[in-house]
Image (cartoon, rainbow, N blue to C red):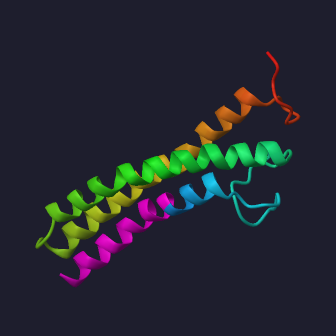
Amino acid sequence: MGFWIFMLVMDLLIPVTMVFIGKRFQKKPPKEINGIYGYRTAMSMKNKETWEYAHHCCGKLWYVSGLVMLLPTVIALVCVFGKGNDCVGTIGGIVCMAQCIPMVGAIALTERELKKRFDRNGRVRRD
């Protein structure tokens, strides 16, 4: 039971973090472009406009993905309630790996949106 609770809490960390950071990035991205905190890629750090747009896009993706992952995460762990630690650990690990897909996938989608909206110098496209 204790290991099951531990795995449930650990598996909820990724979606809950994505929900809170996603909402924060949407509403209040880091004020200054920096190399420590925020969505940091070469394209997002071109200028203030790319920085804010990248945070808005990534924040929206993380927020929605985090919300969508909450229920399946709980369902997956409820299905192994009362099972052995090996089973709980395996399912918990699979859930965690599956959660990493949308978390990391948001980077590719955000970069695609940045390239649609801005040229390689960070200027808004006029086409």
Q: Residue furthest front?
A: 27
Outermost residue toward the top?
127
Query: Is 1 rendered above or below residue 46?
Result: below
Picture quarter with the N terminus: bottom left
The correct choice, above or below, for 18 with respect to 109 in the image is below
- 25 or 92, which is in the foreground? 25
Nearest to the observer: residue 105 or residue 84: 105
Q: Position of residue 77 (x, y in %)?
A: 22, 64
Q: Residue 6: which quarter of the image?
A: bottom left
Residue at screen point 42% across, 68% down:
13
Residue at image position (49%, 52%) is 63
Q: Residue furthest left?
A: 82
Residue 101 visible in the snapshot: no
**Residues rendered magenta in the picture:** 1-19
**Horizontal and vertical percent position of residue 19:** 47, 58
**In this rendering, position of residue 7 left or right of residue 117:** left
Q: Residue 111 appears at what percent x and percent y?
A: 67, 38
**What residue is at 61 percent from the left and 39 percent from the top?**
108
Q: Is residue 22 visible?
A: yes
Residue 53's spot in the image, x, y percent? 71, 43
> Which sits in the foreground, 90 or 64?
64
| Quadrant of res 123 | top right
Which quadrant of the figure contains the C terminus? top right
Q: Residue at x 38, y 60 (%)?
A: 96
Q: Is residue 10 left or right of residue 21?
A: left
Looking at the image, residue 120 sits to the left or right of residue 52; the answer is: right
Would you say residue 41 sits in the magenta stretch? no
